[in-house]
Amino acid sequence: MRIYSNSFELMSELGRELNSYGQTVKPKTYQNQVIEGKEEFETKELICQQYCLTSLGDPVWLFVFSHSKEWADAEFEERISWYELNPGKAWELRRDLWEQFLVDGKFDYTYNERMAILPYTIQLLRSDSDTRKAVLPIFNGNGEDDTLYYHGNKRIPCSMYYDFLIRQNGKGEKVLHICYHQRSSDFVTHFGNDVYLAWRLMEYVAQKVGVKPGYLYHTIDSLHSYKKDWKYLNTNLEDLQEKF
């Protein structure tokens, strides 16, 4: 497993790896949209990418492609809200991206809906710090069976689950690690947001439980980029950051 010490290392190395070693595939759907035969959606893909991020560092590098930190902060607050939100308000900060996925004024799902059991997950971690059961399911969360939507007429989550583990670090302190499993992540449009939101969730749960945050362990079954975005994979991040 690759280990990265900050966001700059993570984004730089994974972008180069995807550009150099990504295999070409031609998916038929994108979210709930049909893209079969559209050249701009030809895809470079790495299968089962795994890494550990030990420190977030300056998160600006996570948003160097998407310019979406304001959205990510608003989205996080909606995700942890105790009130059910669909569509919520955060999406309006990236209206150009999200509006196309609205169906009759709502999204097929929101993370806010899927994370409804988060308070119980926190309660479990408080009562049993050695537990291996503190899993927050997203793919089939909130009683939804997303296998019913494999035909592509509805969006299904790219995230499978978040798993929280309280363990001792090298100093003997109890820290909370987060293990995040995704079936799919678009490197240019979403990956940086996925990392940031997982890290913030780890920090939030750690604070609620009363321990320090630890590391992010991230597994992505399909880390990919569409042809329309390949130009970014071979670009120096510092050059992009100057325009950010």
Image (spheres, grey):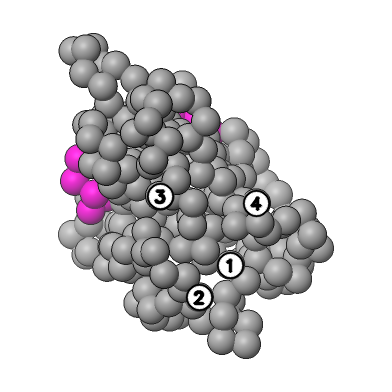
At 40% from the left edge and 49% from the top edge, which residue is drawn?
119
Task: Determine which quarter of the picture holds residue 213.
Answer: top left
Mark 1, secondary structure of its residue: loop
Mark 4: few/some/many CA within 10 Å (<14, 14-19, 20+)? some
**Residue type beneath disc 3:** Pro
- Per the image, the residue denoted by label 1 is 109
Question: Horizontal and vertical percent for residue 33?
Answer: 68, 72
Disc 1 to disc 4, how far (Cα)? 11 Å
Q: Earlier in the sequence, mark 2 or mark 3?
A: 2
The magenta stretch is 49-61
Observer-side mark, 3 or 1, equals: 3
- Per the image, the residue denoted by label 3 is 119
Disc 2 to disc 4, how far (Cα)? 17 Å
Mark 1: few/some/many CA within 10 Å (<14, 14-19, 20+)? some
Disc 3 to disc 1, how far (Cα)? 19 Å
Question: Horizontal and vertical percent for residue 203?
Answer: 27, 42
Is residue 76 something one can see in this rendering? yes
